[in-house]
């Protein structure tokens, strides 16, 4: 995504020097070496094929046995890729900011004092999930940036803009209205709720 979509857009607008170095892109699922056995394992293997409860629950002792390798396991940028890359590349301490758009980002969010959620308003189930996470960690700074990730795609500045973009599509309007009602209750939408 960075190589074929994001960097070309950045270069076109800001020049070659602004491109993201590909060796700094770390949010992919990587193979891990289990130091206790010497075997290669993947996040999918430890969460689905042969579930490892200590890994799934991020037990610090179990996590310290796993070393993220420079070999991608797949092109998925969820769970193991992000949390593991943070541990091995950035550090094991608290992060200043984490940003994401799905429940697969919750483990990464748990490491940061400031959390930016790209709120896919056309996905009411995600709004409910994030409402739950915000309530669990209400003392943390949560920022919500509403967006629509289906036609018409894009970030939304206000609920009025959202209403304009979804007008004429009853299914999309119903979904975005449901998400709005859920997220508005969190008090974290800021000026989005005013037009």
Image: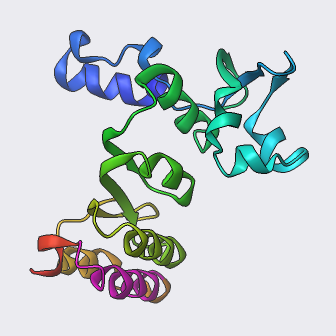
At horizontal 67% and vertical 35% (from top left) the residue drawn is 61
In the image, residue 173 lies in the stretch drawn in magenta: yes
Residue 153, visible in the rendered structure? no
Q: Is residue 116 left or right of residue 121?
A: left
Q: Residue furthest front?
A: 61
Q: Is residue 139 left or right of residue 126?
A: left
Q: Residue furthest right?
A: 50
At horizontal 42% and vertical 45% (from top left) the residue drawn is 111
The x, y position of residue 144, in whole percent, is: 28, 64
The x, y position of residue 11, in whole percent, is: 27, 19
Q: Nearer the viewer, residue 22 or 108?
A: 108
- Quadrant position of residue 166: bottom left
- Quadrant position of residue 191: bottom left
Color theme of the render:
rainbow
Q: Which residues are magenta?
A: 172-188
In the image, residue 193 lies in the stretch drawn in magenta: no
The x, y position of residue 68, in whole percent, is: 64, 21
At horizontal 45% and vertical 80% (from top left) the residue drawn is 172
Q: Main secondary structure of the magenta part?
A: helix
């Amino acid at each position: 995504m960075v190589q074929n979509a994001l960097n070309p857009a950045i270069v076109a607008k800001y020049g070659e020097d602004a491109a993201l170095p590909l060796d700094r892109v770390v949010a992919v699922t990587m193979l891990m070496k289990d130091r206790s056995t010497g075997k290669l394992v993947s996040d999918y293997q430890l969460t689905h094929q042969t579930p490892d409860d200590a890994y799934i629950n991020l037990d610090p002792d179990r996590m310290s046995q796993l070393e993220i390798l420079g070999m991608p396991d797949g092109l998925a940028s969820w769970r193991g890729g992000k949390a593991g890359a943070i541990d091995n590349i950035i550090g094991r301490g608290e992060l200043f900011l984490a940003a994401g758009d799905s429940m697969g980002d919750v483990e990464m969010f748990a490491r940061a004092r400031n959390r930016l959620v790209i709120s896919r308003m056309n996905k009411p189930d995600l709004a409910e999930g994030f409402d739950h996470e915000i309530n669990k960690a209400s003392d943390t700074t949560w920022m919500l940036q509403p967006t629509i990730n289906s036609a018409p795609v894009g970030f939304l500045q206000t609920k009025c803009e959202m209403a304009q973009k979804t007008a004429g599509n009853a299914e999309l309007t119903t979904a975005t209205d449901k998400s709005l009602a859920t997220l508005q209750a969190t008090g974290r939408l800021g000026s989005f709720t005013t037009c």
